[in-house]
Amino acid sequence: MTRLTGILVSALAVLGAQAVSSSAVLDLIPDNFDDVVLKSGKPALVEFFAPWCGHCKTLAPVYEELGQNFAHAQDKVSIAKVDADAEKSLGKRFGVQGFPTVKFFDGKSAKPVDYDGGRDLESLSKFITEKTGVKPRVKKALPSKVEMLGDATFKKQIGGDQDVLVAFTAPWCGHCKSLAPIWETVASDFANEPGVVVAKVDCEADDAKDTAKEQGVSSYPTIKFFPKGSTTPQPYEGGRSEEAVVAFLNEKAGTHRTVGGGLDAKAGTIAALDSIVAKFVGGATLAGIAAEAKKAAKDLKDTSAAYYVKVFDKLAQNQDYAQKEFARLQGILKKGGLAPEKVDDLTVRTNVLQQFLGTREKDMKDEL
């Protein structure tokens, strides 16, 4: 009976760890660590991380993909992580002094082996296979959104009507391997931005060596930003997390992308028109403000300027238009299943509509 109880406790602990999120990586805390890692009888690779750690942020998408690739063998090996900043007792217990720290537990002993290999998917997968005999199942990758540039295409792409962020890499470089999935994610985040290109140059390829030499690349990865209309690069010296790169591109290209590829609350809004809308919200008469908005919109090239005018026209027919249309569009977005381009369009429209609404409606959107 005691043995059965122990088995049930262990099973519930594993299920509890899996239920925390849809991630393929188990989240461990003091209450479930021993049952999942030390008493389950199966090996486990455990990352001890801190949310504020830049290297941890860089490793995160690689580690998540690692978990997905070994998800088919969850009965044979666990891929797990510990927020050692929140769960300091676990970090102290296993002598964690820096982040990220990755340790391998064989399922038989409480003494782990430190992992000191590369932080790329290939190195981590090879380590697990060597230790457990379990091979990863790599899902078929989606078509890459990263533009590969070489000697024949680099000069054609740079200096045109697009902002270009280029990673100069080498196939043997461990840091480049760690950057690769992040670069793919960033490229996907900006896939709906026609004015932005996320590119890569394989500096070891025969058809790209001249470009690498001309750009003075001497270490990998080297990341450079080329503004539209310019062949003079600006070095990127920020973090290598998705969050950091997205923020950099937004600042340089004037875009409003978020991590994951969505649009932020400012996307589509126009400061010059927002100031006019503010007068209306503050109590100015509709007719006079609408005329002012139409005049201002004529001189603007921004595509959403026409939508501001449309909202003013609709309000002249129905004073509740902005509130009702905002709720309708939010309902469509909440249902999901939309093409990315449609999501962008509806997000821009709700952002504009929000300028016409009072505090109550703005708070309502935040809650949604």
Image: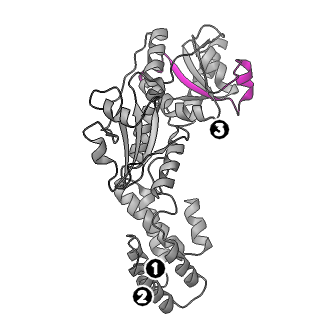
Q: Report the disc number at residue 321.
A: 1
The boundaries of the magenta stretch are: 72-98
Of 104 and 110, the residue lying toward us: 104
Q: Residue 226's x, y, as percent? A: 41, 48
Crowdedness near tag 2: few (<14), some (14–19) or many (≥20) residues, C-alpha within 10 Å: few
Residue 338 visible here: no
- Up/down of 197 relative to 178, above or below: below
The type of residue carrying mark 2 is Gln
The type of residue carrying mark 3 is Trp
Q: Report the disc number at residue 346.
A: none
In the picture, measured across the screen, residue 165 lies left or right of residue 33, that is left
Q: Is residue 102 highlighted in magenta?
A: no
Q: Residue 317's x, y, as percent? A: 42, 87
Q: Earlier along the polypeptide chain: callout 1 or callout 3?
A: 3
Residue at image position (64%, 16%) is 6
Q: Report the disc number at residue 52.
A: 3
Of 333 and 52, the residue lying toward us: 52
Q: Residue 142's x, y, as percent? A: 32, 37
Check the image and name the residue furthest to the left: 152
Residue 171 found in image quarter: top left
Q: Report the disc number at residue 317.
A: 2
